[in-house]
Image (cartoon, rainbow, N blue to C red):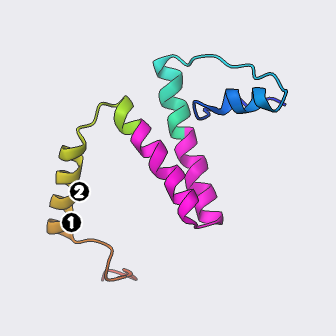
Amino acid sequence: MKYNKLIRDKIPEIIKQDKKTPITHIASNKEYWNKLKEKLKEEVNEFLKDSTEEEFADILEVIHAISDFKDFNKKKVNQIRKSKAEKRGRFKDKIILDEVS
């Protein structure tokens, strides 16, 4: 079966333990970035179908991989998030914008 998708680091070993042969390659930076974005979409779609903590954790794992790859400063990102929350609010109050007239 062909996949052509980004997988977790230990998946090849798990496949071998199942007496199968994984065929893999190491992505270039360009391919890795594209596959991270694909993986994020995949994990978000899985979460939309089954909104469990496990699926949410999968999204966070991809977010962490993106943060590491893009060399984002986690403290700075959190400061930006907090600043936006102060200026524009959060999503806590469940407000739906129906229309602007």
Q: Is residue 54 magenta?
A: yes
The Cα–Cα distance between marks 2 and 1, rounded to whole angstroms, is 6 Å
Q: Residues within 10 Å of mark 2 (few under 14, many from 20)?
A: few
Q: Say what secondary structure mark 2 lies in.
A: helix
Question: Residue drawn at (56%, 48%), measured in percent from left and top?
Answer: 41
Total marks in image: 2
In percent of width and height, residue 99 lies at 37, 81
Q: Please state if 65 lies on the left or on the right of 43 as rendered.
A: left
Comparing 13 with 69, the one in front is 13
Q: Which stretch is magenta?
A: 38-65
Q: Eyeballing the image, is 70 above or below 49?
A: above
Question: Which residue position is annotated with label 1?
Answer: 85
In percent of width and height, residue 65 lies at 43, 37
Q: Please state if 94 lies on the left or on the right of 18 as rendered.
A: left
The answer to which quarter of the image holds residue 18 is: top right
* Amino acid residing under circle 2: Arg
Question: Which residue position is annotated with label 2?
Answer: 81
Which image quarter is the N terminus in? top right
* Amino acid residing under circle 1: Ala
Q: Eyeballing the image, is 92 above or below 76?
A: below
In percent of width and height, residue 21 lies at 80, 22
Q: Say what secondary structure mark 1 lies in.
A: helix
Q: Is residue 13 magenta?
A: no
Question: Residue drawn at (39%, 81%), measured in percent from left and top?
Answer: 96
Main secondary structure of the magenta stretch:
helix
Pointers 2 and 1 in contact (C-beta within 8 Å)? yes
Question: Residue drawn at (40%, 42%), measured in percent from left and top?
Answer: 64
